[in-house]
Image (cartoon, rainbow, N blue to C red):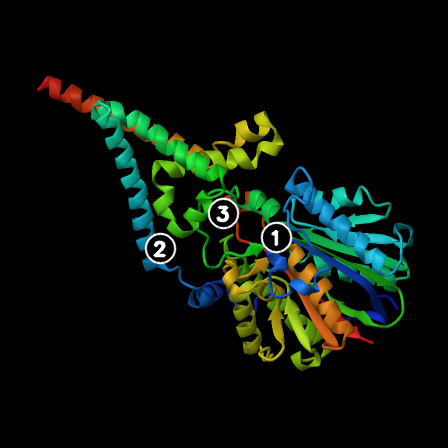
């Protein structure tokens, strides 16, 4: 029956669990020094990663993450049927230029910092539809490339607002297979674009919190689950303020998030790392998942995870023209089967 | 929000955010801006006095003093120190002439990789440009006002 895998309004339940076969994370020095440092596969100390520009460095981090993820399961490029990937840069140059060197059919995605779960849900759809056997998912961000594109030159002496977030330098990759066991994708709730009228590009947590709230609420309504169903519910990069707002709004809707809710942007850094409200960027939820959550699922610390990457869909042009910030969040459930 | 099924009103949300938003440390920032800004200005005064001690008049010494301060700002930007000062000092290091140097040199450094014409040349005034444009416009307006008052005085 057409649409029979759709549950409720926005949730897609895969007909079989789709195992995440391997993940990899490559991060910058600051992330490596953070509380999750030991979980990352590679920490690069040089923000240029031996390249001539930061953009090239970000691209190289994506390729590096792909190679590490493939190496862990002794697979090669030829085994991959699709690659879904994205980043924050204009025309997705980090992902597109990384894909240039990979002989893999490629879809570039822009969902701002929500890209990682957007890619995971599309990978699930491609695999569940029997269009593929192994799908590669990547997303990346880089402090310097994002800063110069969205804000100011990095050496400009300006004071950041307490609500500002620090773009994570990092690339995450995951390879998902068509059947098996382990940590598996089981369903995905695709988000709608939500705009609550926030215009401050230095306060993306507040802008994105309603989108995260909407998607999480929709996920619970569609599936009939409650927050207790999951061991951990993690938003992508709301930061301290956005997390507090999302938690408050969900609690008003009747969902008690106080026990198992966290945010990748909050846990990737400690407050003394001078990151203000926390981490952000496509690489934030990607590396925290690929590094920390995936290994916690494998070793049994967690059995059920709802990952909700959140994206602020702004551009420097829209900010200058005084537009408010439309945001989106996609949720994927990853359960140990 | 364009969709009909709004769960939370935008106005209400704005209020909700305002309530939860961490406040910037205004008192600490003001004190730091005062101290660092004052320090930079004292240093500038010291340089001015030095040039005066070489026998220059106040007017003659102003030029070389500005050059020394601009050089310092540019040099510290190049060393990657000025942005760290700015983080603590805020307006204290933005407003003095050293901050002007920082606003020129930092984009020039940033966009070197885009080439000397489309990068450094085109982007150098990215931050300082508006300041230059509007200070020039203001000086023209003030000049016209000055000229008109002189004309008026001459007729009396």
Any part of residue A24 in sight: yes
**Quarter the C terminus of chain A occupies:** bottom right
Q: Nearer the viewer, residue B45 or A200?
A: B45
Where residue B71 sits: x, y (%)? 40, 32
Where residue A285 sits: x, y (%)? 67, 61
Residue A238, numbered circle: none
Left/right placement of residue B156 relative to residue A107 reads left
Distance (Cα) linking label 1 and label 2:
32 Å
Q: Nearer the viewer, residue A186 or B115?
A: B115
Distance (Cα) linking label 2 and label 3:
27 Å
Distance (Cα) linking label 1 and label 3:
14 Å
Kindly indicate whether the residue at mark 3 contacts the one at mark 2 (C-beta within 8 angstroms). no
Kindly indicate whether the residue at mark 2 contacts the one at mark 1 (C-beta within 8 angstroms). no
Which of marks 3 and 1 precedes in the sequence?
Answer: 1
**Quarter the N terminus of chain A occupies:** bottom right
Residue tagged 1: A313
Q: Check the residue under mark 1 and report the chain it is in.
A: A
Left/right placement of residue A77 relative to residue A316 reads right
Q: Disc 1 or disc 3, which is closer to the eye? A: 1
Q: Disc 2 or disc 3, which is closer to the eye? A: 2
Residue A322, numbered circle: 3
Image point (46%, 45%), residue name:
B83
Vertical relation: B147 (above or below) A275? above
Vertical relation: B79 (above or below) A236? above
Q: Mark 2: give few (<14), some (14-19) or many (20+) Cα within 10 Å.
A: some
Vertical relation: A337 (above or below) A165? below
Where residue A293 sits: x, y (%)? 71, 69
Residue tagged 2: B29
Image point (41%, 37%), residue name:
B73
Vertical relation: A154 (above or below) A211? above
Farthest residue to the left: give it. B156
Which element type, helix, strand or loop, lies under badge 3? loop
């Amino acid at each position: 029956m057409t649409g029979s895998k759709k549950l409720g309004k926005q949730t897609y339940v895969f007909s079989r669990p789709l195992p995440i076969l391997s993940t990899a994370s490559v991060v910058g020095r600051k992330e490596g020094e953070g509380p999750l440092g030991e979980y990352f596969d590679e920490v690069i100390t040089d923000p240029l990663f031996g390249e001539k520009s930061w953009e090239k460095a970000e691209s190289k981090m994506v390729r590096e993450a792909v190679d590490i993820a493939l190496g862990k399961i002794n697979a090669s490029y030829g085994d991959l049927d699709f690659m879904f990937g994205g980043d924050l840069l204009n025309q997705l140059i980090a992902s597109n230029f990384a894909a240039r060197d990979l002989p893999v059919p490629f879809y570039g995605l822009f969902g701002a910092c929500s890209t990682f779960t957007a890619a995971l849900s599309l990978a699930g759809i491609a695999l569940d539809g029997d269009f593929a056997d192994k799908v590669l998912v990547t997303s990346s961000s880089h402090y310097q490339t994002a800063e110069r594109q969205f804000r100011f030159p990095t050496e400009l002496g300006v004071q950041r607002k307490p609500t500002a977030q620090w773009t994570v330098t990092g690339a995450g990759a995951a390879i998902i297979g068509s059947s098996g066991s382990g940590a598996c994708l089981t369903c995905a709730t695709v988000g709608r674009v939500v705009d609550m009228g926030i215009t401050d590009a230095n306060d993306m947590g507040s802008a994105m919190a309603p989108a995260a709230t909407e998607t999480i609420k929709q996920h619970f309504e569609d599936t009939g689950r409650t927050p207790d169903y999951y061991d951990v519910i993690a938003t992508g990069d709301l930061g301290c303020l956005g997390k507090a707002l999302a938690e408050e709004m969900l609690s008003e809707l009747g969902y008690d998030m106080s026990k198992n809710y966290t945010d990748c942007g909050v846990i990737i850094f400690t407050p003394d790392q001078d990151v203000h409200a926390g981490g952000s960027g496509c690489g934030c939820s990607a590396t925290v998942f690929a590094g920390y959550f995936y290994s916690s699922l494998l070793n049994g610390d967690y059995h059920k995870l709802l990952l909700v990457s959140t994206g602020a869909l702004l551009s420097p042009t829209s900010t200058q023209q005084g537009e408010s910030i439309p945001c989106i969040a996609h949720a994927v459930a990853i359960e140990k089967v | 929000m364009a969709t009909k099924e709004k769960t939370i009103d935008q106005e209400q949300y704005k209020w909700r955010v305002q309530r939860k938003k961490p406040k910037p440390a205004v008192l600490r920032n003001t004190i730091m801006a005062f101290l660092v800004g004052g320090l930079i200005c004292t240093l500038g005064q010291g340089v001015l006095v030095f040039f005066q001690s070489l026998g220059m008049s106040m007017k003659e010494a102003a030029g070389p003093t500005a050059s020394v301060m601009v050089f310092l700002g540019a040099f510290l930007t190049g060393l990657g120190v000025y942005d760290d000062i700015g983080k603590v000092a805020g307006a204290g290091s933005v407003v003095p002439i050293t901050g002007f140097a920082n606003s020129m040199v930092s984009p020039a450094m940033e966009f070197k990789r885009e080439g000397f014409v489309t990068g450094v040349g085109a982007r150098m005034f990215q931050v300082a440009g508006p300041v230059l444009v509007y200070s020039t416009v203001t000086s023209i307006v003030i000049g016209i006002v000055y000229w008109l008052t002189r004309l008026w005085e001459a007729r009396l």
